[in-house]
Amino acid sequence: MSITDVLSADDIAAALQECQDPDTFEPQKFFQTSGLSKMSASQVKDIFRFIDNDQSGYLDEEELKFFLQKFESGARELTESETKSLMAAADNDGDGKIGAEGTSAPVRSIIP
């Protein structure tokens, strides 16, 4: 599966352009521009599996650091503060991981 099977390459490029500089990544804005906010729960789970490098069913901070690179290989890494902010926004139970079950909830919970 390629991420462009579910998201438009143009939308991904626009979302990455908005946050190309360090400490400019805003999850809500990225999700809206990339089209993630319009996806079904099933499509969000597909994206989650694509981002879950070790296929553990969870995303940790190390995987989130490379979040943008999952959309385009040449994209930058998230900064430590951006990674922590994304984790805090999506980690509903405070265990330091984002689970595969109900993966649409974190995306939906940080979209205005």
Image (cartoon, grey):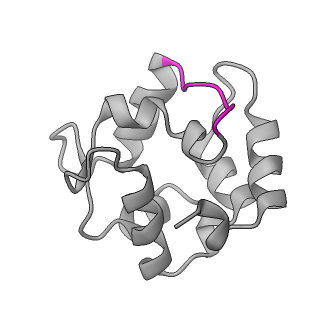
91 left or right of 22 in image: left
45 left or right of 47 in image: left
Q: Position of residue 107 (x, y in %)?
A: 47, 60
Using the rendered view, name the quadrant where residue 63 is placed: top left
Quarter occupied by the C terminus = bottom right
Q: Position of residue 43 (x, y in %)?
A: 49, 76
Vertical placement of residue 19 versus 48, above or below: above
Vertical placement of residue 105 versus 68, above or below: below
**As rendered, which of 1 and 84 lies closer to the eye?**
1
Q: Position of residue 103 (x, y in %)?
A: 35, 65
Q: Position of residue 34 (x, y in %)?
A: 70, 58
For image coordinates 55% across by 45% down, the residue present is 70
View extreme (front): residue: 1
Residue 3 painted magenta: no
For image coordinates 29% across by 47% down, the residue present is 91
**As rendered, which of 59 and 18 lies closer to the eye?**
59
Q: Which residues are magenta?
A: 73-79
